[in-house]
């Protein structure tokens, strides 16, 4: 099994990955290999790839990338194990710091070109396309171009991450609602802190690089009690997934001692302990779901 | 395609559905047909079935119900199209009003019996097991019995429902967070109303039977403006999925005019209009994702 968090092959903006069975094929050659291509109108699906384990792809996503698509456009965040399943030309956008705008622009150009050639395009996004994935913006781009995308939901790590660490976002008598928000506002600003609600589980994404400031805001601005359980789920669904348990008052020190391996989700609320056997400690590595089925 | 919202076969508490290929098999006969069964220890997976379309099953769920499981225990909410895929004995719990406790008890007894026989048990739950599915309580039951369940996330309709109606719960410049809560508190009480936050999308589940009272609370207790866009997504992912668009101030009258077909999700916030072309009207029926792949 490939570690999905290894870096994909380097390239200035795009990586172009030939599937094994089509070593000599290029995008430009592909259409001529299908008789019906000239009569087709381009189609696009915006598809969520889930948190990383291929077994957590939806059937719709699996079918789309293995048999439906003529071309797949993915982000670097999509796991290698999933990208390995792609059976057509695959482009991976480079959105490293400083390249986000140009990487996105090139992705749009590639997709536009393919759609105008009458191809079936899959835009594969990590997690769910509409949860902090800017999928809505891509949807509007393609609609404006005359190609209304089909949206296929994927498992968002905001929900599946806690679950895979045995943390139920809702649990009778413990949490009757959950809030998903970001720990970093637009343009790296500090987001508005949601105030403490005892029967709510709060999930912060993109928060761990500023954990200390966030925890300070939780206490001082949000009124969160220091003894409230919290958890960090690192690399959800990967073979080396890890869950760090602590409280609002102890999490910063705990992470200083254990280290932290991105990406991670920060979960705040009583639900963190609803199913716990051993609290206040790191839970062991989990096996991939794939291994036993 | 079968309408997943037709009633499953009636039975006092359980429906026992023989797969086509095993017309004469019963649960008691099943173990003897596998040589290795006597050496096995019972295993259980708590699996989310997603909103209803079989194409929105995860690969893990599909493999579990088609090849891994010796027995599948499901709720009536799980769609017929998904139950058709089950290739082993299938029990469907009857949790009609007045039968919830006894239906759940019988399900626990069936599962316990199977686990003690060394069988592989799948407990298949609608949506995601940990989002208002009481999966945590089942988890604790089986752990106490000595069988630690594996949890497999599924697409929760709280997220996938809005997405399938082209409503992004988060959208840059519109919504930077989302809250999922219930419109009905425990024991049919009125839940605490979350106050209005302009950059938040709020999703209410189990809310539509008391829509009028809920909307009144939104305005009077929560401070939600009457012109705020709202949407109801009915039967998410089914072939007859429908989305009704209105505002806080007009939704009650709109539903009086259009009627309402459960189950449905109530979405409140500016994101309802982020990708809309035609607001304030019912959007047409959507095709099943399954039809085109």
Image (cartoon, coloured by chain):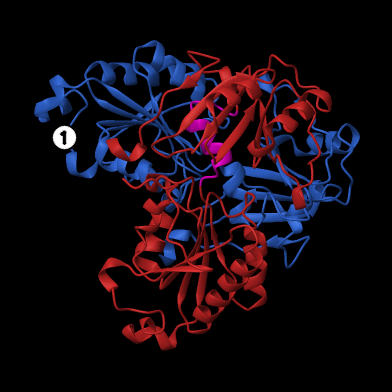
Chain colours: A blue, B red
Question: The magenta stretch spans which residues?
Answer: B155-169
B5 sits to left or right of B217: left
Residue A192 falls in image quadrant? top right
Q: Which residue is identified by label 1?
A: A24
Instruction: Give coordinates of residue B52: x percent, y percent.
Output: 45, 46
Q: Quadrant of residue B32?
A: bottom left
Residue occupying the point 49% across, 13% down: B278
Q: Is residue B263 left or right of residue A38?
A: right
| Depth check, front residue: A99 or A274 | A274
The subunit letter for the residue under badge 1 reads A
Residue A96 visible somewhere in the drawing: no
A119, above or below B86, in the image: above
A44 to the left or right of A201: left
- Residue drawn at the location 78% of the way across and 55% of the way down: A173
Magenta highlight on residue B156: yes
Q: Quadrant of residue B201?
A: top right
Q: Secondary structure at mark 1?
A: loop
Q: Nearer the viewer, residue A258 or B220?
A: B220
- Asked whether B203 falls inside the magenta stretch, the response is no
Residue B87, how many percent across, how many down? 34, 66
Is residue B51 visible in this depiction of the protein? yes
Please give the count of numbered marks on the rendered protein: 1
């Amino acid at each position: 099994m490939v570690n999905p968090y290894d870096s994909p092959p380097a390239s200035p903006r795009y990586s172009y990955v030939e599937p094994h069975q089509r070593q000599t094929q290029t995008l430009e050659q592909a259409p001529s290999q299908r008789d019906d291509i000239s009569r087709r109108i381009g189609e696009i699906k915006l598809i969520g790839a889930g948190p990383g384990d291929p077994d957590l792809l939806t059937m719709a996503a699996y079918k789309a990338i293995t048999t439906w698509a003529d071309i797949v456009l993915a982000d670097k965040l999509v796991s290698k194990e999933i990208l390995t399943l792609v059976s057509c030309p695959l482009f991976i956008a480079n959105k490293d710091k400083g390249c986000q705008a140009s990487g996105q622009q090139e992705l749009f150009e590639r997709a536009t070109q393919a759609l105008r050639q009458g191809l079936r395009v899959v835009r594969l996004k990590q997690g769910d396309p509409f949860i902090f994935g800017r999928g809505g913006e891509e949807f509007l781009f393609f609609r404006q171009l005359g190609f209304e995308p089909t949206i296929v939901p994927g498992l968002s790590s905001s929900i599946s991450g806690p679950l895979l660490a045995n943390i139920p976002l809702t649990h009778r008598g413990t949490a009757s609602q959950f809030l998903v928000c970001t720990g970093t506002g637009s343009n790296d600003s500090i987001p508005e802190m949601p105030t403490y609600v005892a029967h709510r589980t709060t999930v912060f994404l993109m928060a761990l690089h500023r954990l200390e400031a966030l925890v300070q805001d939780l206490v001082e601005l949000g009124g969160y009690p220091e003894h409230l359980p919290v958890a960090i789920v690192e690399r959800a669904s990967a073979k080396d997934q890890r869950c760090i348990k602590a409280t609002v008052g102890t999490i910063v020190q705990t992470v200083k001692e254990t280290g932290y391996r991105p990406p991670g989700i920060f979960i705040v609320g009583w639900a963190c302990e609803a199913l716990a056997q051993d609290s206040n400690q790191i839970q062991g590595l989990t096996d991939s779901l794939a291994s036993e089925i």
